[in-house]
Image (cartoon, rainbow, N blue to C red):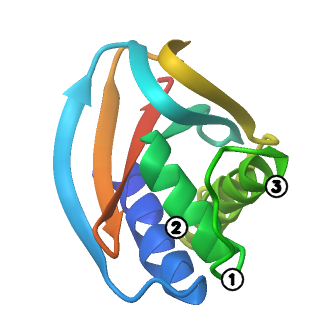
Amino acid sequence: MDIRYVNPFIESFASVMPQLGFGSVTKGNLSAKERELVSSGVIVVVGIVGSIKGNVVYVINMESAKKIASQMMMGMPVNELDDMAKSALSELTNMLTANAATFFSQLDIPIDISTPTLLHGENVSVEMSSNKVLCIQLLADGIPVDINISFEK
């Protein structure tokens, strides 16, 4: 995968998360994954079309998802993943992916994004759009978010 397709997501996370009140944004692990992702927690799928086609899948474990949703809702406690928390997490991924689209446009790579689809549970399986999936773990105040990126040739 072309590294130019990864950097917009890193730049977006570094730009958006501080606006939501997170003080520290750091990079975690970088790994390659298979086409079929099996994850537990909150999984949000966003499609990408335009000059490049594919999808991005955000994976957040349940406790981390509650912490992020709480931060987005001005510190309101989130004890369970209710509709308000799900909405906040969907909006976060929408903001992150839309911001990445802006960074792509600065590289003369115009893209459009789909509405986020949020799934949650144990051992949720998601089929990516290509066999090559790159996973970047990014952390906001130590809270990990895995961003799985897959683009078709």
**Label 2: few (<14), some or many (≥20) within 10 Å?**
few
Marks 2 and 3: CB-CB under 8 Å?
no
Q: CA distance from mark 3 to mark 1?
A: 12 Å
Residue 151 position in % (x across, y down)? 49, 31
Relative side of 105 to 56, left or right: right
Q: CA distance from mark 2 to mark 3?
A: 35 Å
Give the residue pinned by disc 3: 84
Residue 64 position in % (x across, y down)? 44, 54
Circle nearer the viewer, 1 or 2: 1
Q: CA distance from mark 1 to mark 2?
A: 34 Å
Marks 3 and 1: CB-CB under 8 Å?
no
Q: Secondary structure at mark 2?
A: loop
Give the residue pinned by disc 2: 107
**Label 3: few (<14), some or many (≥20) within 10 Å?**
some
Q: Secondary structure at mark 3?
A: helix
For badge 3, the amino acid type reads Met
Residue at x-position 74% and y-position 46%: 113
One can see residue 112 in this view: yes
Disc nearer the start of the sequence (3/1): 1
Disc nearer the start of the sequence (2/3): 3
Disc nearer the start of the sequence (1/2): 1
Asked which quadrant contains residue 118, the reply is top right
Residue 104 position in % (x across, y down)? 56, 62
As drawn, 18 above or below 39: below
Residue at x-position 71% and y-position 41%: 50
Circle nearer the viewer, 2 or 3: 3
Relative side of 34 to 95, left or right: left
Give the residue pinned by disc 1: 74
Relative side of 144 to 151, left or right: left
Considering depth in this image, is 98 or 116 the residue closer to the camera?
Answer: 116
